[in-house]
Image (tube, grey):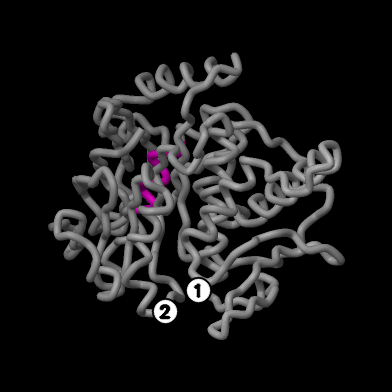
């Protein structure tokens, strides 16, 4: 499931906005305050019903502040986001200003969620019957994607079901913590298998997926693992003289920490959602990233989108940027310029 078209009606500053999305990469560019983040927020809201329909998964919904304020300083009757996918699914989600008759009469008839829920029910039934089906991943990394305290809880065996891979995927505040807990749990399982087999070269395939994503995406980093006493994420760092040194996550630069957390979280979600695939990094995904250049060195800004597409070849990336460096490697067909509440 990939996105083709998004329509906003009365969403924040946008009276009406039609958004065409490229199937692989769309980059929104504009001045501060132009509404780039609002577009990503609206797409996250539009994807929210997917997550909330799945078992044991939480999504995201409209906020009261998403409803547009008119020239009189009053809220308009409603806000709506409509989504259309490449496989021709169409749905919309609407929030009313209030429940008055006047408000209800002002709201055009919605398409609703019927098409979407029928489509999702097939996924739910197939997964519950333990049959192989590729579960798409949906995730939003906003500008608050700071890396929190990285100490890993040893009681990390939680719900590791396929649907749980999408939990909180549109809310950035807890993503990395869950990724660390998953990584710790998988390392624990890997160790038990090694001991049972007396084969200490054994690698758990689902865990190797995440390791491979990190080393592919992150130049100079290898062997991500959970160190003990206390338990923290540690990586091997290649120095210019050819030596390697173990570094805890908080010892890396801001750019490396943020990108490593993003890649680890996305790869973990793919691996958990589709453990039956030979290469879970081939999972379809819709990935929203606000300020994709956040804290990255200018040289890395030039390659970050190419690196992401190489690491996650079937993901659709929808990103914003302020950086001219990022745009040097982006084709014109992938760029959307936002100015005066219109896109070109």
Q: Position of residue 176 (x, y in %)?
A: 62, 56
Judged from the image, the secondary structure of the residue bearing numbered disc 1 is helix
Q: Position of residue 12 (x, y in %)?
A: 32, 54
Where does the magenta region start and end?
40-48
* Spatial separation of the CA atoms under disc 1 and disc 2: 7 Å
Magenta span main SS:
helix
Question: Where does label 2 land, which residue?
Answer: 297
Displayed quadrant of residue 193: top right
* Labels in figure, total: 2
Q: Position of residue 249 (x, y in %)?
A: 65, 70
Tell me, yes or no, whether the highlighted magenta stretch contains residue 42: yes
Q: Is residue 110 visible?
A: no
Up the image or down, 316 lies above or below 83; here it is: below
**Residue drawn at (26%, 60%) of the image:** 28
Question: Where does label 1 land, which residue?
Answer: 255
Q: What is the quadrant of the C terminus in the image? A: bottom left
- In the image, is 204 to the left or to the right of 98? right
- In the image, is 332 to the left or to the right of 143? left
């Amino acid at each position: 499931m990939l996105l083709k078209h998004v329509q906003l009606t009365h969403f924040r500053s946008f009276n009406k906005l039609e958004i065409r999305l490229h199937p692989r990469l769309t980059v929104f560019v504009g001045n501060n305050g132009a509404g780039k983040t609002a577009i990503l927020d609206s797409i996250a809201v539009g994807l929210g019903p997917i997550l909330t329909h799945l078992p044991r998964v939480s999504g995201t919904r409209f906020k009261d502040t998403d409803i547009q304020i008119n020239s009189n300083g009053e809220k308009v009757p409603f806000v709506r986001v409509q989504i259309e996918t490449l496989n021709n699914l169409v749905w919309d989600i609407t929030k009313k200003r209030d429940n008055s008759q006047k408000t209800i009469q002002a709201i055009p008839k919605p398409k609703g969620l019927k098409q979407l829920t029928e489509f999702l029910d097939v996924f739910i039934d197939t997964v519950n019957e333990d049959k192989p089906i590729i579960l798409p991943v949906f995730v939003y990394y906003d500008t608050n994607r700071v890396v929190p305290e990285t100490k890993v809880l040893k009681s990390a065996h939680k719900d590791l079901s396929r649907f749980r891979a999408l939990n909180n995927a549109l809310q950035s505040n807890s993503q990395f913590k869950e990724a660390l807990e998953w990584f710790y749990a998988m390392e624990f399982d890997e160790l038990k298998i090694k001991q049972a087999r007396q084969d200490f070269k054994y690698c758990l395939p689902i865990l190797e997926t995440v390791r491979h994503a990190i080393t592919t995406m992150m130049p100079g980093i290898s062997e991500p693992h959970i160190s003990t006493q206390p338990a923290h994420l540690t990586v091997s760092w290649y120095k210019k003289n050819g030596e390697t040194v173990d570094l805890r996550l908080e010892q890396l630069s801001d750019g490396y920490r943020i990108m490593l957390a993003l890649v680890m979280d996305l790869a973990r979600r793919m691996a958990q959602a589709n453990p039956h695939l030979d290469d879970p990094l081939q999972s379809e995904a819709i990935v929203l990233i606000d300020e994709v250049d956040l804290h990255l060195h200018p040289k890395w800004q030039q390659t970050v989108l190419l690196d992401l597409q190489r690491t996650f070849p079937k993901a659709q990336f929808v990103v914003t940027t302020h950086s001219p460096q990022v745009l040097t490697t982006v084709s014109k067909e992938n760029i959307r310029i936002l100015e005066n509440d219109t896109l070109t």
